[in-house]
Image: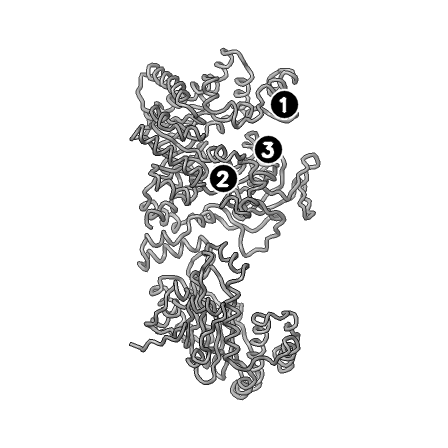
Amino acid sequence: MQKLVELSGFTRIRRVAPIANDTHGGRAKCLQRLIRLDLPVPRTVALSFDAVQNIAAGDLPDMVALLKAFGDRPLVSVRPSSQDPDWGGPGAMLNIGMNNARHAELVESHGEEAANALYLRFVQSFAINVARLDPEMFELDRGLGRDALTAALDAYEAETEEYFPQDPCIQLAEVLRSMARAWGSTTARLLRQAKGAPADAGLGLVVQQMVFGVGPGESGAGVVQFVDPATGKKQITGRFLGQSQGRDALRATTGAIYLTRDDRGPSLEMKCPELFETLREYGDLCRVKLREEMQIEFTVENSALHILDAVRVQRSARASVRIAVDLANKGVISPQEAVLRIEPRSLSELLHPQIDPTGKPDVFLQGIAASPGAASGKIVFSSTAAQASEARGEACILVRRETTTEDIRGMHAANGVLTERGGVTSHAAVIARGIGLPCVVGAGDMRLNTKEKTLETVQGHIFHEGDIITLDGTAGQALAGAAEMLDPGLGDAFQTLMGWANDACDIEIRANADTPADAQVARNFDAHGIGLCRTEHMFFEENRLSVMREMIFTDDPDERAAALERLLPMQREDFKKLFKIMQGLPVCIRLLDPPLHEFLPSGRTGLRDLSDAMGLPLSDVTRRVESLSEFNPMLGMRGVRLGITVPEIYDMQARAIFEATIEANRGGAPVVPEIMIPLVSAKKEVELVKSRIDGVAAAVRNEQGADFNYSLGVMVETPRAALRAHEIAQHSAFLSFGTNDLTQMTYGLSRDDAGRFMGDYVNKGVFAEDPFHILDTEGVGELLTIGAERGRQANKDIVLSMCGEHGGNPESIAFCRAAGFDYVSCSPYRVPVARLAAAHLALK
């Protein structure tokens, strides 16, 4: 066993040195692992987090002792070593120890051009990054020769009124101090915190002996990796800067590392097959022993190979999935570890088309990323225009100030949605996520002129209807023109990973699905059922909307019954399709929730069209619409209030559910529908609705001569419902917490308008996060906990769930698991994200 060398805050990296990721950083630990694998790593010393912190405070280690580890004429580099490589760090500094004397030696041994180039690069880097001098002074257009070196030294002396430091100890001390203080700067701290680093994250530094990659034999430097960072497929790529050096001439040949010859230049494999094969062996060794795909940084000096560093290959989400699954299939890691290696939110990149990162995006607008994926199409400013574009087979992007229920058909027809207003739980965002449509909301820097049919940004960009743009719902951006796209990555690796995740889950993941198409997506993603079917979205097809409007316009009970009788078979058919697709899995159907005025037009053109369709004077139509309007419709005549005041609507829906259940049971797996009453606040509301629904069930049983089971529950969306859950639970089989409205009512915030100021609130620390995006576990979460505890006290068998948009967030799933909830429900395209998040929580 080699003797351990430990010197006041720094440690020579050897096989048994006390190097750890949480004390010296990931780079230092990785270099130790490479040494343990007997890879030819140059002599290296690691400075701990504490040592670097002391350096930043002015307490430097013994520079003489440190450099003594590198011989009498040290030449070293310094690189950062943070705990997580994604947290970044100061840039590497090379050639420390270069001075006039060492330059003269290198002129003799390597030639003047090589010596000049090495010294010049160090002077430039030291001046800019350590002395903090103006970079323009050292961007000298004189090549790498003697004149350029002299000019750089003169510029340094002129600016600092000092000669360029010649003592390697002083050089290294200044470099270490500069890098330590750069890590502690406000900008650096904010950048790494944005990547998930704690505020007090430490930095280690690695000092390594320089290997120039210059010599009379085969020499050069490069990097190599063994997978494609975009796809994760096996592919050897890299770059190699080869140096062919004579005494007075330095010639560089740039080549890439390829498996086979092509027309892109010489490759390392062709020039040095033995070195190439050694690199391949090192890659295989790192894959097995480090259990990861690594990018290897190397230097070749006189045909001798040196490994300077190895870092985890930077990769896309789809590449991460393929790599993790491949490593697990080969037994390098376990399936459980493969699951844990994939960040749940990153799966959104695989589920939808994405903009090709190799392109050059022309971003003209930034908004809020409301629904992931990307799409290109012609701008349209109305739902009617979107439907017309779909009929012509033309892709389009629907651009609106904000969307309403009138826009649902247009959203289904469009390829993407862009709105000026709204937040992550606005109407546009919720519907877009449900149907897998790229969506950007809250783009406050655009101004719409619907009369002129133009979109103008504050920067002066003007787009007209018919112009092609691209939406990036993942990044919340709008781009000019049609961008290159990557297809979704739902191949074998994705399916395998999801199977492993499903095996680990200990909480069910259902989907919010309003249509058969939504249900099929949920089924394809192996959702455990439908946790929320919003029946109002079934009424917006043209043939149904007209009947719905007839029902709304009449005050005559017989006429209303006739209209509902026409809607009954349509609803029944919808439910039959849902039951058939879900194949016996639970389906929770929410009875009609929105106020009736949402089914009526608001603009003059829409009112005129409605007047023509119904054969009524425009004035009568206008008066009826105005009579249904409310000062605050989201807190008005909606939900259970509608079911109590116009009970025929819920009667029709219950009958459609029961008749569809009987038909589904005759031809497939037994169906037990779950009927959910929305916006409940009081026990009596549940009693009134339950008595009517039970009556409808009895009538259907008698008429059909068939029996069936069903359960009735409540959507907890008001604070009072959560507080009185012990009363409501007495008449309910389940409580499903609708956190969209519950958050809105708890905070007194409009989720459609909060986007205008929420950014300021988060930036100023009023809220830690947007409560419509990340569940407020302290306020809203306390109401959920109270509701769950009181509900179970009154009904020990009651089923608890969350069905708001929060249901797909890892943080919300963690909360629900801790609170003993039975399942969460989210948009169909978020089901894989939620399943993976649940698996992470169970495995950890």
Percent across and percent down for residue 472 are: 55, 47
Amino acid type, label 1: Leu
Q: Which mark is residue 147?
A: none
Earlier in the chain: of badge 2 and badge 3, it is 3
- Callout 3: SS: helix
Q: Tell me the residue that label 2 is attached to.
A: 772
Q: Tell me the residue that label 3 is attached to.
A: 383
Q: Tell me the residue that label 1 is attached to.
A: 607
Percent across and percent down for residue 320 are: 42, 55
Instruction: Check disc 1: other Cα within 10 Å, few if <14, some if 14-19, many if 20+.
Output: some
Amino acid type, label 2: Phe
Percent across and percent down for residue 457 are: 66, 45
Q: CA distance from mark 2 to mark 3?
A: 26 Å
Percent across and percent down for residue 597 are: 56, 23
Which of the 4 image quarters holds residue 24? bottom left
Query: Is residue 141 in view from this perspective?
Result: yes
Which of the 4 image quarters holds residue 124? bottom right
